[in-house]
Image (cartoon, helix red, strand yellow):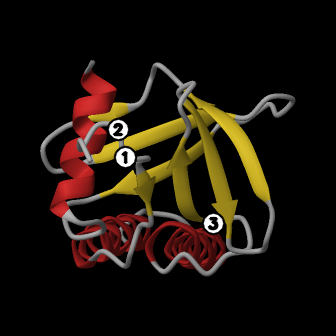
Amino acid sequence: MDDLKRPLIIEPKFSKLLFFILVVIHVGALVCVWSLAFSIWIKFVLLLIIVILFVCVLRRHCFRISKNSIKLMEQHIDDSWGLYRVGGGITQANLSSNSLVTRYLIILNYKVPGKWFSVSVLLFPDSESSDNLRRLRASLIT
């Protein structure tokens, strides 16, 4: 069967690269907040907010254990996508034009009908097979 005729199914896995980037960014944010000339209580609140956001981002995009995380994406013939969530349920969505495709990072922004916010999925080279990422890049560029 031709590669392009096969349905494209993306099942993102844990990415060490994404984990490393998130740790560096959030540790940098913690250092920046700690060096501010604020009272210790304001620093504590800001540090707590950064830690909570770090845990939320890790659960959703890195470990994919949040109930709203996307565990599988399936491209349909009409270029719509089926998004399978960890918490159960399938959402039909359309890929937004503001998605980003580079060699080392793919950011897929999906617009779900009837929802205000888009759903984002981050893909790094170690989060999916190279064949699926190549097919995804080819389908997104054309």
**Residue at the left extreme, as displayed:** 103
Residue 105 vs 138, above or below: the answer is below
Query: How many discs mark residues in the rendered view?
Result: 3
Which element type, helix, strand or loop, lies under badge 3?
loop
| Figure quadrant of residue 124 | bottom left
Contact, mark 2 vs mark 1 (Cβ under 8 Å): yes
Q: Give residue 10's position: percent from left, percent from top.
A: 42, 58
Query: Helix, strand or loop at disc 2?
Result: loop
Check disc 3 and give the amino acid type.
Ser
Q: Report helix, strand or loop for mark 1.
A: loop
> What amino acid does circle 1 point to?
Arg
Q: Nearer the viewer, mark 3 or mark 2?
A: 2
Residue nearer the viewer, 77 or 74: 77
The residue indicated by pointer 1 is: 6
Residue at 38% x, 65% y: name it: 29
- Front residue (pair 41, 19): 19
Q: Furthest residue to the front? A: 1
Looking at the picture, how far across and down is residue 121, in whole percent? 48, 52
Query: Mark 3 or 1 closer to N-term?
Result: 1
Which residue, given by chain and number where applicable, does mark 2 sit on?
5
Tell me which residue sits at (59%, 68%) in the image.
53
Quick check: 19 above or below 21? below
Give me the C-alpha separation between circle 2 and circle 1. Answer: 4 Å
Q: Earlier in the sequence, mark 3 or mark 2?
A: 2
Which residue does the numbered mark 3 point to in the structure image?
A: 69
Q: Real-space Cα distance between discs 3 and 1? A: 25 Å
Q: Is residue 39 visible?
A: no
- In the rendered image, residue 128, in percent from the top left (x then y), is placed at 29, 66
Is residue 134 visible to us here?
Answer: yes
The quadrant holding residue 39 is: bottom right
